[in-house]
Image: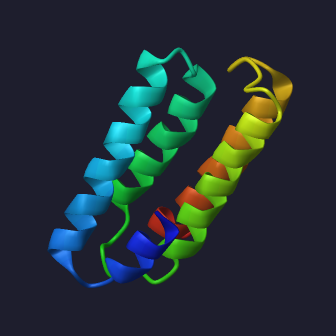
Amino acid sequence: LTAAAADAEGDKDRWEQLKIAVIDIRSSSASAGYDQLSAVANSLEWLLGEAPPGDARIAKVVKLHIEAISRLIEDGAPRLGSPKVQELLGSLGRASDYITRGC
């Protein structure tokens, strides 16, 4: 996904393909009962919907989301309501807001 985000810069078709891949990850993880992974993918889906397609910073925030998913898997996928997951989602939200809203 990180490479796809970098490749999608300025290419509308690739941008749409990236968004479709993220939607698939979100829905698949939710169907499998991994709500915390689905929440991270949902955050990434929101980012891709709000950010301008040509923004080079997107690849970095996509990488943060992928690292978050990896950490959740390594940690045994803690519950969505756990403080650790909530802190992680908050951090991803702040990074996404910075890119999309400049705050």
Image location (x, y in percent) of residue 27 = 37, 29
Name above or below for residue 41 compared with residue 30: below
Image location (x, y in percent) of residue 84 = 84, 32
Q: How many marks?
A: 0
Quarter assignment of residue 37: top right
Does residue 66 appear anywhere in the picture? Answer: yes
Image location (x, y in percent) of residue 65 = 60, 53
* Picture residue at 15% right of the left edge, 71% below the top: 13
- What's the coloring here? rainbow
Residue 37 lies left or right of residue 12; in this view the side is: right
**Residue 66 versus residue 56: which sits nearer the camera?**
66
Q: Quadrant of the C terminus?
A: bottom right
Does residue 94 appear anywhere in the picture? Answer: no
Residue 52 lies left or right of residue 38; in this view the side is: left
Quarter assignment of residue 35: top right
Name above or below for residue 90 compared with residue 17: above
* Picture residue at 69% right of the left edge, 55% below the top: 67
* Picture residue at 17% right of the left edge, 74% below the top: 12
Image location (x, y in percent) of residue 50 = 35, 57
* Picture residue at 43% right of the left edge, 80% below the top: 6
Q: Residue furthest left?
A: 13
**Residue 23 versus residue 49: which sits nearer the camera?**
23
